[in-house]
Amino acid sequence: MPDAGRASIAVAAAGDGGQGAFAYCSQQYRVVFGAGTSARLGEETERLGIKRALVLTTSEQQDLGRQLGAGLGDRLAGLFAGARMHTPVEVTNEALGIVESHDIDGLVAIGGGSTVGLGKALSLRTGLPHIAMPTTYAGSEMTPILGETTNGIKTTQHSQDLVPDTVIYDVDLTVSLPPHISAASGLNAIAHAVEALYAPDANPLTSLMAEEGIAALARALPRIMTAPADPGARRDALYGAWLCGVCLGAVGMSLHHKLCHVLGGMFDLPHAETHAIVLPHAAAYNAAAAPEAMTRVARALHSANAPQGLFDLARQLALPRALSDIGMPEGAIARAAEMAVRNPYANPRLVDRAPIEQLIAAAWRGDAPVQH
Ligand code: NAD
């Protein structure tokens, strides 16, 4: 039972085989998946009744936006290629001006989480239909979550209205994602699924998706490292990322995500790499309290032990192993532990200061995960 006197929340490791009671809430969206599916963009805009679409991209992906936008014919009203990381409100306002002055009646976001975030921010403000065409494994297109920044301060909101109406997963659009970015982005997606397996609101359906998502990414990512254009590997990775994104959007996240938010925020560490380094250690911390979740993770990884399997996968993908490698100062470990135990997210094991400091120290050194 949770101990109200401690700065932590413990919850039963739910989702353990779907034995207990559960609630499941589905979201409404349409998914079109497969190689070459961007050719169906015109058809999908028509289905939503869009007649004047604004295509959104980052500046790096504007050529792709132009190329795919051409497929819209008369339905293309314009391109806004200003999407940026963390959805700055000034960028949203600039795009909003274009939406209003050009009589736009639908949004097509082509890119990673940054571009999909802009699509969500615009759709929330205007009520316009939103088609997302993801090109990374971040998973934002499956979540009712939007993080926006105003003057460098990030705020997060939840609303079912944020989920895009249609998501076109065209495997071909992910082939250009460089292997090392694919690996980090894929491990980040796996982290959503691992935590979904022991989430307080885990349920049999998300647990099935989580295990399948981990398995698909774990078999795809090593192949992408050696053959980045392998269509089967790219298909598996995007399929896995979709499932992991559904998990992120459907159930609450725990210790691992809290640690990554704290460490990333305090030291401006790269988001996906931080996830890849911390995940085996967070899994080891929770392993004894969430045995069924660990069985599923291990099975998906074809490993005898879930935390070690996650560590081995990250090593195989040549991802950085240690927080010290990505810029976290050693002297900050105690302070980070202090921050990490404040306002903890629900977690299967009590979140205590001393073992959390040990966890962060082990991740800082790049040790193999150890269950304390
Ligand atoms: P990103 O969208 O910022 O893209 C990173 C860079 O890679 C950009 O320059 C982009 O143009 C480029 N790129 C994207 N796809 C490419 C491809 N296939 N080939 C070549 N280059 C490509 O990166 P991301 O990791 O997808 O998204 C990160 C953002 O998404 C963050 O702001 C994060 O907070 C947000 N996010 C939100 C949620 C949510 O649920 N709200 C979930 C995950 C991530």
Image: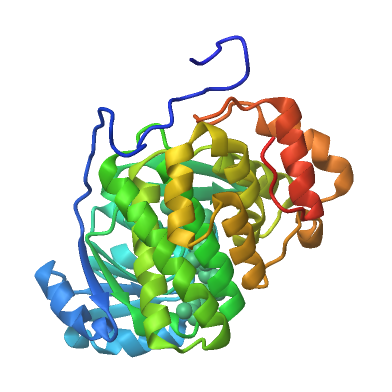
In x, y percent, where is residue 159? 32, 42
Q: Residue furthest top?
A: 5
Instruction: Establish if 226 lies above or below 261.
Output: below
In x, y percent, where is residue 67? 35, 90
Tally of marks = 0
User: Is residue 11 in sight in this rendering?
Assistant: yes
In x, y percent, where is residue 343? 59, 26
The colour style of the image is rainbow
In x, y percent, where is residue 193? 43, 51
Instruction: Establish if 217 lies above or below 269.
Output: below
In the figure, is residue 241 to the left or right of 34?
Answer: right
Q: Residue furthest right?
A: 331
Which residue corresponds to the image point at 53% horizontal and 59% vertical from the top-left? 303
Q: Nearer the viewer, residue 18 or 83?
A: 18
User: Is residue 58 in sight in this rendering?
Assistant: no
Which residue corresponds to the image point at 45% horizontal and 84% vertical from the top-left? 175
In the figure, is residue 54 to the left or right of 88?
Answer: left
Q: Nearer the viewer, residue 125 or 155?
A: 155
Residue 22, located in which quarter of the rendered image? Answer: top left
In the figure, is residue 291 to the left or right of 41?
Answer: right
Image quadrant for the C terminus?
A: top right
Which residue corresponds to the image point at 30% horizontal and 62% vertical from the top-left? 100
In the figure, is residue 227 to the left or right of 166?
Answer: right
Q: Nearer the viewer, residue 156 or 293?
A: 293
Residue 351, located in which quarter of the rendered image? Answer: top right
